[in-house]
Image (cartoon, rainbow, N blue to C red):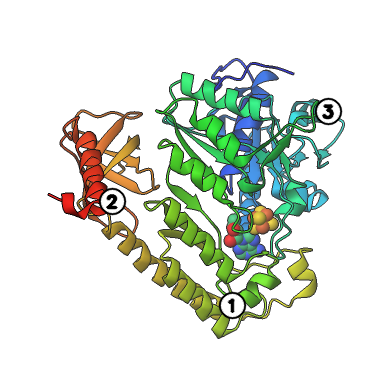
């Protein structure tokens, strides 16, 4: 095992063969692409930023909805043109579509290599075999162990501030609509020591924020193979990452409503550097739909989890995922989703139309019977409602101050910076001497449903915190001893 856990910088060397990677889908795919680049960099390849410069073109794909796959087929046609104009270019398809479609992809005239999510260590070998005239190459074997724990991903982010760390792979939940368990295999948790070392190395290399990634982080559970009585759960892992340094922000995604216990919430409450934001996909507000989706929670138990978040973490934001038009969804089911959204008042949401995925339980057992125009109308109603809820959530921040981690320069003006509050709200403000990678205290003066506009806040007097605590103590004492109240 290679123990060099450093946040590897991309290697740029014109004398080496050049690899270009394009990534579709979720944050885990972004991190997987960084793992692939690390594997190739070690095997003697250099990384380039333009398709036109590449000897090897890789496309890391997503199968979650049909439109994600259609986009990839479109790109393969573009790569075919590239291969026609430049002899010797190699094209490889990676990720979920590689796993799902296997030989069908290999039959595309552009494609030379197909490698599934657990086959990335094998890519240099696949390239070598292809070059030695062994024909098109494929490896889509899924593993019960692979976590790429020993591979330091090549960090491809532009800012050097925020990085992803995958803490587990696969998913065991078998939501009936979802292709993920089929294409990413069984759930497995990564050795916590390798996660801590990676986070520490990132911090030592100037990173200020890590996002711990998994399909269902709440079921993270690592058992020491040498001592099966020793195990680490997600709350414990989170605490250990938070303890690396109070200046390192810690985020995580995705939480599952059936598994998110109070332990995680208390850990968040204890460490101010764990950001107060939870992504808690609900999918639907109707119990009939939740049952059919095999989500293993009810509307009521979801609302109970939300109430617990609000009780333990009063300023925590909650985002969600919602699917419109799942099999057999009635108008009443749809209204249940809208009313749940109103009740929770989600701060933000990712919203989708149901897209049937071949061979999932839903595809095999339930007709995809909500007409497309009804799906579209329901999705639009969901989006419209969420826009209002997001705006209201942002309006609540007006006049308040937040510590933002500065991640980049605003697209609108190079004199403005962009950062995020702990609650994951994007904030734009005049730079006034601040720089990327630093923290700034800002006061919000206006907002849209998507962005907060702010100004650098006057520094609060250093003793402000102490004064507030003293006032609070006085309040409490006053309440307990009314006679003494001043
Ligand atoms: N159709 C539409 N949306 C889906 N998702 C997963 N599978 C499907 C599907 N077949 C959504 C869920 C999940 C998010 C990552 O993608 O909302 O939480
Ligand atoms: Fe898919 Fe459900 Fe697993 Fe999420 S938890 S990846 S929706 S099966």
- How packed mark 1 is, by other alpha carbons closer than 10 Å (few <14, some 14-19, many 20 or more), is few
Find residue 448 and report its image quarter.
bottom left
Give how far apart the Cα atoms at labels 3 and 2 are: 52 Å
Depth check: 374 or 279 in front? 279
Whichever of labels 1 and 3 marks the residue nearer the N terminus, that label is 3
x and y percentages locating residue 446 in the rendered image: 21, 54
Q: 331 or 245, which lies in front?
A: 245
The first of marks 3 and 2 along the sequence is 3
Q: Which residue is mark 1?
A: 372
Mark 3 residue element: helix
Answer above or below: position of 314 versus 141: below
Q: Which is nearer the eye, 379 or 276?
A: 276
Q: Quadrant of ligand 1?
A: bottom right
- Crowding at dot 2, Cα within 10 Å, few <14 / some 14-19 / many 20+, comes out as many
Residue ID for mark 2: 452
**Residue 144, horizontal then vertical, whole percent:** 81, 40
Label disc, if present, on residue 94 of the rendered structure: none
Q: Is residue 164 left or right of residue 481?
A: right
Q: Secondary structure at mark 2?
A: strand
Marks 3, 2: nearer the viewer: 2
Q: Residue 455: x, y in percent?
A: 19, 42
Q: Is the distance from the Cβ of mark 1 to the nearest ligand 1 atom less than 8 Å?
A: no
Q: Which residue is mark 3?
A: 129
Q: Is mark 2 within 8 Å of ligand 1?
A: no
Disc on the earlier residue, 2 or 1: 1
User: Residue, x 54% and y 19% (percent of image)?
Assistant: 12
């Amino acid at each position: 095992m290679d123990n060099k856990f450093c946040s590897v910088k991309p290697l740029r060397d014109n004398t080496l063969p050049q690899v270009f990677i394009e990534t579709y889908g979720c944050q885990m795919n972004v991190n997987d692409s960084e793992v692939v680049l690390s594997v190739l960099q070690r095997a003697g390849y250099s990384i380039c930023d333009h398709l036109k410069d590449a000897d090897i073109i890789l496309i890391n794909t997503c199968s979650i909805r049909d439109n994600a796959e259609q986009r990839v087929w479109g790109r393969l046609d573009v790569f075919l043109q590239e291969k026609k104009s430049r002899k010797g270019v190699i094209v490889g398809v990676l990720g979920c579509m590689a796993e799902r479609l296997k030989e069908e992809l290999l039959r595309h005239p552009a494609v030379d290599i197909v490698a599934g999510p657990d086959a990335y260590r094998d890519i240099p070998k696949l390239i070598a075999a292809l070059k030695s005239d062994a024909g098109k190459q494929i490896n889509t074997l899924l593993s019960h162990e692979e976590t790429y724990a020993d591979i330091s991903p090549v960090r491809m982010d532009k800012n050097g501030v925020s990085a992803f760390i995958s803490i587990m792979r696969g998913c065991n939940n078998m939501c009936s609509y979802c292709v993920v368990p089929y294409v990413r295999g069984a759930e497995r948790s990564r050795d916590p020591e390798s996660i801590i070392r990676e986070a520490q190395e990132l911090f030592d290399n100037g990173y200020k924020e890590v996002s711990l990634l998994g399909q269902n982080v709440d079921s993270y559970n690592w058992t020491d193979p040498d001592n099966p009585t020793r195990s680490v759960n997600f709350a414990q892992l989170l605490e250990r990452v938070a303890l690396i340094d109070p200046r390192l922000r810690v985020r995580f995604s995705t939480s599952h409503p059936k598994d998110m216990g109070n332990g995680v919430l208390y850990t968040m409450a204890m460490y101010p550097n764990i950001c107060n934001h939870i992504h808690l996909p609900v999918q639907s507000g109707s119990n009939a739909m939740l049952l059919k989706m095999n989500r293993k929670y009810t509307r009521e138990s979801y609302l109970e989890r939300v109430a617990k978040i609000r009780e333990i973490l009063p300023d925590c934001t909650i985002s969600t995922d919602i699917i419109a038009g799942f099999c057999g969804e009635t108008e009443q089911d749809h209204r249940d989703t809208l009313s749940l959204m109103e009740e929770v008042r989600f701060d933000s949401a990712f919203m989708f139309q149901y897209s049937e995925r071949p061979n999932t339980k839903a595809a095999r057992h339930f007709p995809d019977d909500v007409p497309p125009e009804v799906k579209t109308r329901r999705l639009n109603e969901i989006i419209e409602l969420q826009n209002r809820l997001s705006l209201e959530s942002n309006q609540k921040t007006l006049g308040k101050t937040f510590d933002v981690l500065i991640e980049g320069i605003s697209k609108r003006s190079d004199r403005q910076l962009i950062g995020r509050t702990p609650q994951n709200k994007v904030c734009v403000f005049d730079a006034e001497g601040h720089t990327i990678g630093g923290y700034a205290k800002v006061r919000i003066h206006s907002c849209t449903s998507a962005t907060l506009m702010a100004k650098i806040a006057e520094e609060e007097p250093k003793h402000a915190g102490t004064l507030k605590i003293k006032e609070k103590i006085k309040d409490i004492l006053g309440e307990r001893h009314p006679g003494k109240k001043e």
